[in-house]
Amino acid sequence: MKNIILYIFLGLIFTSCKKIIDVDTNNAAPQIVIEGNISNRLIAQQIRISKTVGYDDLSNYPAVRGAKVTVNDSRGNTYNFTESLPGLYVFAMRGIPGITYTLQVDVDGKSYSAISKMPAVVPLDSIGVVKNTFFGNENINVAAYVSDPVNVENFYRFNLYVNDNLSDRIYVNNDRLTNGNKLRLQLFYDGPNDEDLKKGDKVAVDMECIDSNIFDYWYALNQQTGRGPNQGTTPANPTSNLSNGALGYFSAHTYQRLAITVP
């Protein structure tokens, strides 16, 4: 009985103790963020440059103006990008699969660079809808069908649009375990207010063939935005192919789009 009373007394002491933890949210110095894309479409290719903001600030990333932005390719061509809008640098050109592109950004007395090789085109054969049942509830998701080439390492990224709205999920795949197979890649969809796809929705899928460095970037970002309990990883900057501590990525990739209406 004495031991029981002692344990109760000690328990009351420990449960009544509270430790106040002050979370240090001191803002770090702003960092350069570069988001660069070169595709195999004849369009105004875009390099967007901004800066990070403090933890307590609104997510309104200030544009970086007055940068010198050039892209060189492995054939000896140089493309000088010009600033069309604050922080947005463009040049009208068509990227070519198999060619390596090198980005050079000079701004605020610092230089940043990145290299990306545009992979060969892997055709997006078709897209469709797949019905899944979980615990008696049926929902509809989009599937992309791809014939993966044999003996070639491939990396894919998809963007999903539903009624012209871009899904905030990140969709990336590689063929490490499926090389040379016909792939059915499901693009799970969570709409606003957890809405599911429904009959009559207009769906579009963009497919990019990306290089391994860009796959690593998007895969790491995807891991950090996992959904549900105990999903995701500790927040950290995803591995970038940019030099000198810049955040973001530079991607030379192929592009395809298919669209359907949910039957």
Image (tube, rainbow, N blue to C red):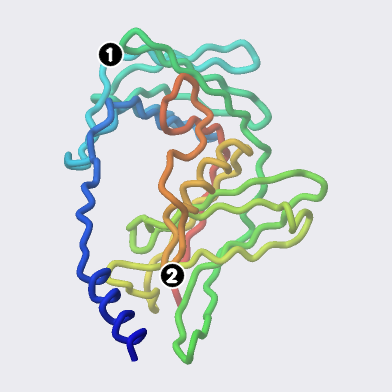
Q: Amino acid at mark 2?
A: Thr
Rendered location of residue 140, percent (x, y): 47, 77
Please tell me whether mark 1 sits on a helix, a strand or a loop: loop
User: Which residue is nearer to you in this view: 2 or 25?
Assistant: 2
Disc 2: CA contacts within 10 A as few (<14), some (14-19) or many (>=20)? some
Q: Which residue is mark 1?
A: 66
The residue that mark 2 highlights is 261
Q: Which mark lies nearer to you, 2 or 1?
A: 1
Q: Is residue 47 above or below residue 194?
A: above
- Residue appearing at x 26%, y 18% in the figure: 65
Q: Quadrant of residue 9?
A: bottom left
Q: Amino acid at mark 1?
A: Gly
Between the residue at mark 2 and the residue at mark 1, the CA separation in whole angstroms equals: 44 Å
Residue 198 pos. (x, y %): 38, 77
Q: Secondary structure at mark 2?
A: strand
Q: Is residue 39 above or below residue 91?
A: below
Report which quarter residue 70 is drawn in.
top left
